[in-house]
Amino acid sequence: MKSRDPWSATIVAASALLVSVLAVSAPASTSVAGAAAICRTWGSNQPPNNGSGDNHLSSVAVVSSCSAWAVGGYLDGANNQTLIERWNGSAWKIQTSPSPGTTNNLLAVAATSPGNAWAVGDRSDGLTDSTLIEHWNGHAWKVQPSPNVGSVNNVLQGVVAFSATDAWAVGYAATVPFLHTLVEHWNGHTWKVQKSANAGSVDNLLSAIDGTSPKDIWAVGDRGAGPRTLTEHWNGHRWKIVPSPNPGSVQDVLSGVASVAPGSVWAVGYQYDGVETRTLVQRWNGHAWRVILSPNAAGTDSQLNGIAMASATNGWAVGYSHSGIIDSALMLHWNGHAWSKQPVPSFGTSDKLQAVGASSAKEAWAVGSFVNVVPQAMAVHCC
């Protein structure tokens, strides 16, 4: 999995990949008033690993209590290959998935029904990255032709689907001398590149996408070498940049977005002041994006990777905190008034949550990876 660790001095915006997650989530905690009756604890239903190499899950889409998809990648020798797993109501099982490139990675998944799901990411021939889109038709996962801009790297990091004939994917394309936003649309027959907005002559990346309808869609990411937050809105006719706050003095990045209603949208990521990385949560109120107070793990750097909202009063944001060489899973819950930290199981020396999703207020999953000798796929379940 490719993700950005803001506390590493070697990371730069032009080379980073932000993992995004697009799903609907549900509340779950015994420590949040009103939530205990819906979802009591987060427990472990660990997914299998493919081979003996590194495994990770980047995204999850929950169709029902008996059907969910999680995607990511695993190391096969020296190369990364696609990893797709399915929840059948009692266990996770690895599904056969194409790996058309020398190196392959799936970064996001979305599903509208048991017979329609999309997974997106990138594949490499050893020289350049190109878009990778795979479709589940109810029987098998198959690679779908997807366009690329230019001849350099193209990566898709987020996907949302409204029906079998309407889906969107976002990411970035490397066009000298900058990265530019990449937006592609599925019309029921083909994937086509759509004109998208960029903020000046700087790098622009989109990391996540979600919407309430085909005429109300939000995509988020970052722009510039700082970088700074980037939010774009689709009104059914065009993509337009909408101003968003930047509370960090050095960096501000958005990596996840969740739409509740046209006037209620959430985005999460991190802010960095040059000393400490902290969680970043923003809310669209129908008129402007505002920063909402969010907790951090004590004494550590913290970041959020994904968010999902079951309603205006129930939502989850997940990520991890970093201290020295130790990473710990981080989970926040929104109860309609405030965000609070929630307990989450620990499995290894480096636990990271990348995504959260649910089919209802009683059925939620969060996925990522943990290290026990080598990185392994991780999934925690709330029911």
Image (tube, rainbow, N blue to C red):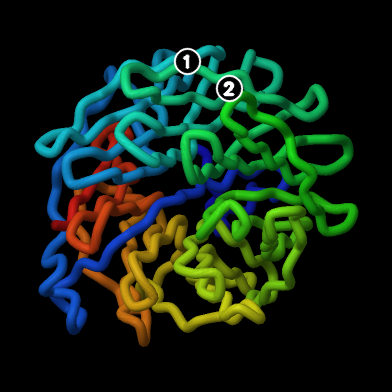
- Residue at position x 25%, y 58% from top? 360
Check the image and report above or below for 88 versus 206.
above
Picture quadrant of residue 125: top right
- For residue 277, side relative to residue 27 (left or right): right
Give the x, y percent position of residue 15. Answer: 68, 41
The three-letter code of the residue at mark 2 reads: Arg
Q: How many marks?
A: 2
Q: Secondary structure at mark 2?
A: strand
Within 10 Å of the Cα at label 1, are there few (<14), some (14-19), or many (20+) other Cα atoms? many
Q: CA distance from mark 1 to mark 2?
A: 8 Å
Is there CB contact under 8 Å for labels 1 and 2? Answer: yes
The three-letter code of the residue at mark 1 reads: Ser
Question: Residue 123 — which label?
Answer: 2
Decide if residue 364 is in sight here. Answer: yes
- Residue at position x 40%, y 52% from top? 23
- For residue 183, side relative to residue 81 (left or right): right
Give the x, y percent position of residue 380. Answer: 21, 50
Question: Residue 99 — which label?
Answer: 1
Check the image and report above or below for 265 versus 89.
below
Ranked by sequence position, the earlier of labels 1 and 2 is: 1
Within 10 Å of the Cα at label 2, are there few (<14), some (14-19), or many (20+) other Cα atoms? many
- Residue at position x 13%, y 63% from top? 41
Decide if residue 218 is in sight here. Answer: no
